[in-house]
Image: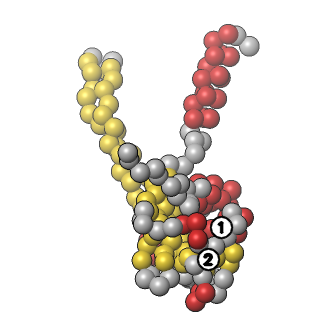
Amino acid sequence: MTRSSFLLGLVCCLVAASCHSAPKVRSSYDARVDFTRLRTFSLVHPNHPVPAPGGVDPFTVFRLRQMAHATLTKHGYRPAALEKADLLVSVNAEARTRTEVIPASYWTPYRRGYYYGSDVRTYRTLLLTIDILEPGKKAVIWHGSTETVADDDLPDADLWTLVQAVLSEFPPKPTKPAP
């Protein structure tokens, strides 16, 4: 193996590894809520596959809900009946189509000059949202979401990564008041 082919292989590995970064999670919450008192939860959706808006396979949404249930249980929250739960958990997924316009310029020998234009890429994504509601008011007290490229059905390992990334932000860390 020559040194240049080794370096090329190393660069390719680094680029491939950088493509598998942790999902970017967005979350927000009601700062007036004392999350430390919340111990039990219930999913607000039926525990069976139902048609989902946005063209997402209902079995994918069902698996995401099961994964959220398992993750919350692992974090010490206890499942409870809908009417007795401290938290109501809503898990949804939506298929989206994204279009990206990338400015491009390059030398074209057959035109003997530079090409200036744009590359347009269109791809499908899956948006996962998890909302935590307060039962009495049925108001959202915490919201988390992430989005990933999903041209085909995502394997369960990728779905687990999404659910765990979103729920890693729950409960929110208390912020210190400004002095």
Locate residue 81, reporting x and y percent. Answer: 64, 87
Task: Classify 39 as above or below 154.
Answer: below
For the residues labelled 2 and 1, the Cα–Cα distance comes to: 8 Å
Asked if one can make out residue 49 in the rendered structure from this viewpoint, the answer is no
Q: Secondary structure at mark 1?
A: helix
Question: Relative to residue 13, is residue 101 depicted above or below?
Answer: below
- Residue under numbered circle 2: 41
Please name the residue shown 50% across and 49% down the image: 24
- The answer to whether residue 160 shows anywhere in this view is yes
Locate residue 36 relative to residue 116 in the image: left or right.
right
Which kind of residue does numbered mark 2 sit on? Phe
Of the numbered discs 2 and 1, the one sitting upstream in the chain is: 2
**Horizontal and vertical percent position of residue 88:** 54, 78
- Quarter of the image where one finds residue 13: top right
Name the residue beneath numbered marker 1: 72
- Numbered label tally: 2
Whole-percent x, y for residue 49 in the image: 61, 81
Q: Is residue 163 left or right of residue 74?
A: left
User: Is residue 45 or residue 29 the one in the foreground?
Assistant: 29
Amino acid at pointer 1: Leu
Task: Please tell me in which quadrant of the rendered image residue 15 appears.
Answer: top right
Q: Are marks 2 and 1 in contact (CB under 8 Å)?
A: yes
Q: Residue furthest bottom?
A: 83
Query: Camera-side residue: 25 or 5?
Result: 25
Label 1: how many Cα within 10 Å (few below 14, some 14–19, many 20+): some
Give me the residue at 59% from left, 42% from top. Answer: 20
Sort mark 2 into few (<14), some (14-19) or many (20+) by Cα contacts within 10 Å: many
The residue shown at (59%, 72%) is 38
Q: Quadrant of the N terminus?
A: top right
Q: Quadrant of the C terminus?
A: top left
| Nearest the eye: 25 or 179 | 179
